[in-house]
Every structure is written in structure tokens, then in C-alpha cells.
């Protein structure tokens, strides 16, 4: 790639240049939901509109994965919107579709009422990884997009220096990225976006790679820049998994569910600025979003989409695979057969050790603890906390209601049991509440020598999941089964065997 092509590639990522044509297909009859329409009714100018967006990818092995499912969304002038969701919700993919960098499989994206047929001309992007050219100075990095757009040197120098000064980097124009801290590098990324004077500033996890104090300082700087109308930014869309960050910055929070990404709520944040993180209103809003993300909020807590009402999703049982009970035909040890119609709930990606540690902390709160406070106590990000919460609620070790977590009697017993009793209790709970663990145990018991190939369980899981998801579920089930002394797995021989203590 020559230098001019490189400049154009960077401009494509910064101001969205060089994507494929946007799709204009729709998914049949349009559906409206009055709860969501109410949020749009007060807006006078729509910057970006997404209508029934879906995104699917096909792997090299031919497996199709749906990343986003039927999402409609408007971004208006004069608002900051945070897109919040767990890992697997497709937040970054959604942002890139709105920016015109990824073509949706279904649906349409419009900018200022015109359907996109390529990169969105009104968007500039700020990335988590800074995306700076290490061989260029701060000023040269900021000028990249302007240079790729053909702006004369004198003019781009003037605009770049003004942007550098606005973001607080005056005096560092000739420095190279390696000479800068992480916070200063991200300031360069922000200046590079601001210099293009976009209608909409898109930020993809912009503060997640920074330390706590630097991230907090930059959030405030971005808010100040947004409020300074001379910078001409009319709206901001920020992708985050940090609930407190979303409440601190946004006027509206869009919540996506996972696997596939789907719209489950839009929550207006009616708090005056600057926002006090310790105020009762702020904490109540954080708790409300935690409740929505854990699937424990009441219907009145969020605006549910029509699709969500028609097809409820449970965070503890995101999607089914075929049947849970399988046995081996004695005539053919490689054939798995269905035994009943029960579905297998996906196992949360949590270890028994991690779950025990979480319960130790929760048990210190006699009346329970808000999830926001629990995350702060553990210094956990939301994506780290939720799998443990899901595992605890799945196994009946804790309950979560309206963002408040409480240990159950079963949880207390497990917490205070000795090692052997803890294993026995966990095994009983896993057999009762974790269908995949029960499936493996059932299959092993029906095999003459109490053993079978792990590939058979993987084949069962692959009927409804990608190969990667199937392998993760299998690994979690093996970890749970080993801890509970239910079964063991020899990876060298790909052999599952019933534990001697379980025979």
C-alpha cells in the first residue's frame, strides 16, 4: 500500500471513507412500538436513522451467525446516546453499520434523510486502541483525515493546531505517539475526529484502555467539548459496557441484549449536569440499568420492543440447543439420540471458584447489595460480573431483583460448607439447574463402560451454535462436572468418563 492509499484508509476509519454500498432491503411489514416512538417524538432533527437492521456472518465452515437482529434506532441533534450491552451484543458492529463501514444484511441506514450508499459523511470515529500512526507526529496524525480529503497544507495546519489546542495538547505538536501516555494518545484520537467537524462523533469504548483517573478526566473533557458549539458536534454516540459511564455521559441509553444483539430498552437519563455519581437519582438509574441487563427488571422499568414482548428472552437461558437428555445406542457408540423435549440452557462462563468468591462477598451483606456497589467493591467491569451473577442465579445460590443481589439459603450453605460438602452441594445444584451437565451425566450413565467421546457432545451443541460457542459450553460443563466430581475429561483421548464417586 502506498502512502496515499494509506492516508485514504485512515480517513476511511476516521471519517468513514471506503465502505461497501449500504443495503436497502427490508424485512417485510414495518412494526412500530409506541414506547420507542415516544422517545423520538420530541426530536426535531434526526441525524442518523437505522431501520430494521440485522447482520449475519458466515464462517469458513459455512456456519451462519446472527450478530444483530432487527434493530431500529434514531440519533438526533443535541443528544448524547450511550449503547450499552454485554459481550456478544454486537455493539461495535452496530456502530460500524451506522457509520457506513459495514453493510447490514437487512435493513437500511440513512443520514439526514438520505440512504447511505457508502461511508457516512457526517460521522467521525474515536477508537479504543487510539489507532495512531507511530511514525507521525501528533500534528501529522491529527491532519491525516484532512490530508486524505485534499485540504491545502496551510489550512489543515491551522485547523489541526486549533483542535490540538482545544483538546489540551498544545506544546505536543511535534511529539510522537511513543512519547505520550495512554490518555494523551486518546486525546490525539479525539482531536483527529474533532478537526473534521462531524455531525456525529462516534466513540467505541474510548476510555476502557485508560486508568480510572485519566478516563474520568477525559469524559469531562469530551462533555465540555460537546457543550462548546464552536466545535460543531451535534451529537455523540458512545459504545460502552460501563453502566456508570453511560449514566454519567448520556441523555439516552440504548440497551442491547446478546446472542444475537437485539434492542431491549431505551432509557432516557433525566439528570441535570454536572451529574453527581453519589446522588440517589444517579444510583437509582444505575441500578435500573443493571436490572435491565440482568433481565430482572419489571416491565415498567424499560420500554420493551414489540419483538421483545412477543419473544421473551431470559438472561439465564439465552437460547436452546436440541435436547438435554441423550443416550448412546449400544449398537453404535458414536450415535447420540434424543430422549425428551427439554431444552439445554447455555451455561454462564463462570468457574466454581469464581462463583464461591462472589458469594463470599455477597454473604457479607445481610440484606443484599446493589450490583453497582458489588462491582465497585470487586473492581469488576460489568462484563466480568454478569457471568458470575448469571451462574449464581441459575444455580439458585443468589437472587437478583431490580438490580439488588441477595444470597439464598442454598448459597449460604455452599459458602460455609467444607470442601467435600461444597462439592456435593454444587453437584446437586448443577444436576438440577444446569441441563448440559445433566445431559452429559445421563449419557455417561447409559454407556456400558461409563465413557464416551467428547466430540459427540460437541456435535449435539453444534446443531444450534457455532463451533466456538459449542466448545466454550463444553469446556464450562467439564469444569463444573469435574468440580462436582460428576465426570472427568481426558483431552488427549477426547474421552469423557463418569467419576468413580458418581458411579
Image (cartoon, helix red, strand yellow):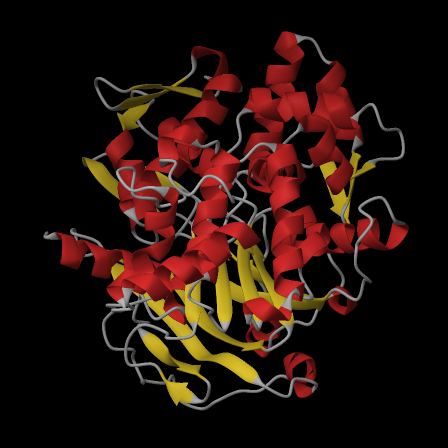
Pick the quarter of the image with the C terminus.
top left
Toward which corner of the image does residue 77 lie, by quadrant? bottom right
Q: Where is residue 79 in the image (x, y as percent from the top left)?
A: 64, 71
- The residue at 50%/64% (across/down) is 201
Residue 292 can be seen, yes or no: no
473 left or right of 303 in image: left
**Furthest residue in direction front, as rendered:** 154
- The residue at 29%/37% (across/down) is 134
- The residue at 81%/62% (across/down) is 271
In this view of the protein, which residue sits in the foreground, 471 or 478?
471
Residue 422 can be seen, yes or no: yes
In this view of the protein, which residue sits in the foreground, 328 or 376?
376
Q: Where is residue 193 in the image (x, y as percent from the top left)?
A: 44, 59
Q: Position of residue 423 (x, y in %)?
A: 59, 16
Q: Where is residue 474 in the image (x, y as percent from the top left)?
A: 37, 34
In this view of the protein, which residue sits in the foreground, 70 or 469?
70
- The residue at 62%/70% (across/down) is 229
Q: In this view, does 335 lie above or below 323?
A: above
230 left or right of 324 in image: right
Q: In this view, does 132 lie above or below 175?
A: below
Amino acid at each position: 500500500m502506498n502512502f496515499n492509499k494509506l492516508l485514504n484508509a485512515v480517513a476511511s476509519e476516521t471519517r468513514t471513507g471506503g465502505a461497501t454500498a449500504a443495503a436497502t432491503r427490508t424485512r417485510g411489514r414495518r412494526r412500530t412500538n409506541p414506547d420507542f416512538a415516544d422517545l423520538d417524538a420530541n426530536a426535531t432533527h434526526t441525524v442518523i436513522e437505522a431501520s430494521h437492521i440485522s447482520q449475519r456472518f458466515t464462517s469458513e465452515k459455512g456456519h451462519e451467525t446472527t450478530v444483530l437482529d432487527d434493530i431500529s434506532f434514531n440519533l438526533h441533534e443535541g443528544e448524547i446516546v450511550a449503547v450499552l450491552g454485554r459481550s456478544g451484543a454486537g455493539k461495535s458492529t452496530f456502530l460500524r453499520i451506522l457509520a457506513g463501514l459495514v453493510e447490514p444484511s437487512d435493513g437500511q441506514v440513512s443520514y439526514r434523510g438520505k440512504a447511505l450508499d457508502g461511508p457516512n459523511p457526517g460521522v467521525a470515529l474515536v477508537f479504543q486502541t487510539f489507532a495512531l500512526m507511530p511514525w507521525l507526529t501528533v500534528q501529522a496524525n491529527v491532519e491525516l483525515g484532512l490530508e486524505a480529503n485534499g485540504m491545502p497544507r496551510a489550512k489543515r495546519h491551522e485547523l489541526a493546531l486549533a483542535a490540538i489546542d482545544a483538546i489540551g495538547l498544545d506544546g505536543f505538536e511535534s511529539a510522537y505517539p511513543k512519547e505520550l501516555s495512554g490518555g494523551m494518545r486518546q486525546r490525539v484520537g479525539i482531536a483527529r475526529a474533532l478537526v473534521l467537524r462531524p455531525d456525529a462523533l462516534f466513540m467505541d469504548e474510548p476510555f476502557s484502555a485508560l486508568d480510572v483517573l485519566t478516563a474520568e478526566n477525559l469524559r469531562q473533557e469530551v462533555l465540555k467539548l460537546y457543550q462548546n458549539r464552536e466545535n460543531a458536534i451535534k451529537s455523540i454516540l458512545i459504545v460502552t459496557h460501563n453502566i456508570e459511564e453511560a449514566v454519567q455521559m448520556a441523555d439516552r441509553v440504548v440497551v442491547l441484549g446478546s446472542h444475537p444483539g437485539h434492542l431491549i430498552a431505551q432509557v432516557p437519563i433525566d439528570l441535570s449536569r454536572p451529574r453527581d455519581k453519589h446522588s440517589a437519582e444517579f444510583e437509582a438509574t444505575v441500578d435500573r440499568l443493571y436490572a435491565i441487563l440482568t433481565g430482572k427488571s419489571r416491565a415498567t422499568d424499560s420500554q420493551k420492543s414489540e419483538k421483545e414482548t412477543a419473544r421473551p428472552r431470559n438472561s439465564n437461558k439465552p437460547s436452546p440447543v436440541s435436547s438435554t437428555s441423550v443416550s448412546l445406542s449400544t449398537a453404535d457408540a458414536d450415535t447420540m439420540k434424543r430422549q425428551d423435549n427439554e431444552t439445554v440452557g447455555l451455561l454462564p462462563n463462570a468457574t466454581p471458584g469464581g462463583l464461591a468468591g462472589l458469594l463470599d462477598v455477597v454473604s457479607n451483606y445481610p440484606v443484599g447489595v446493589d450490583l453497582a456497589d458489588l462491582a465497585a467493591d470487586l473492581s469488576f467491569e460489568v462484563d466480568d460480573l454478569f457471568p458470575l451473577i448469571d451462574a449464581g442465579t441459575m444455580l439458585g445460590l443468589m437472587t437478583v431483583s431490580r438490580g439488588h443481589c441477595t444470597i439464598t439459603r442454598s448459597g449460604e450453605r455452599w459458602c460455609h460448607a467444607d470442601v467435600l460438602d461444597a462439592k456435593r452441594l454444587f453437584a446437586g445444584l448443577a444436576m438440577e439447574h444446569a441441563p448440559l451437565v445433566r445431559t452429559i451425566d445421563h449419557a455417561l450413565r447409559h454407556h456400558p463402560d461409563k465413557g464416551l467421546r467428547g466430540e459427540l457432545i460437541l456435535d449435539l451443541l453444534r446443531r444450534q451454535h457455532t463451533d466456538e460457542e459449542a466448545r466454550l459450553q463444553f469446556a464450562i460443563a467439564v469444569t463444573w462436572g469435574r468440580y462436582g466430581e460428576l465426570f472427568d475429561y481426558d483431552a488427549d483421548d477426547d474421552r469423557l468418563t463418569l467419576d468413580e464417586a458418581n458411579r
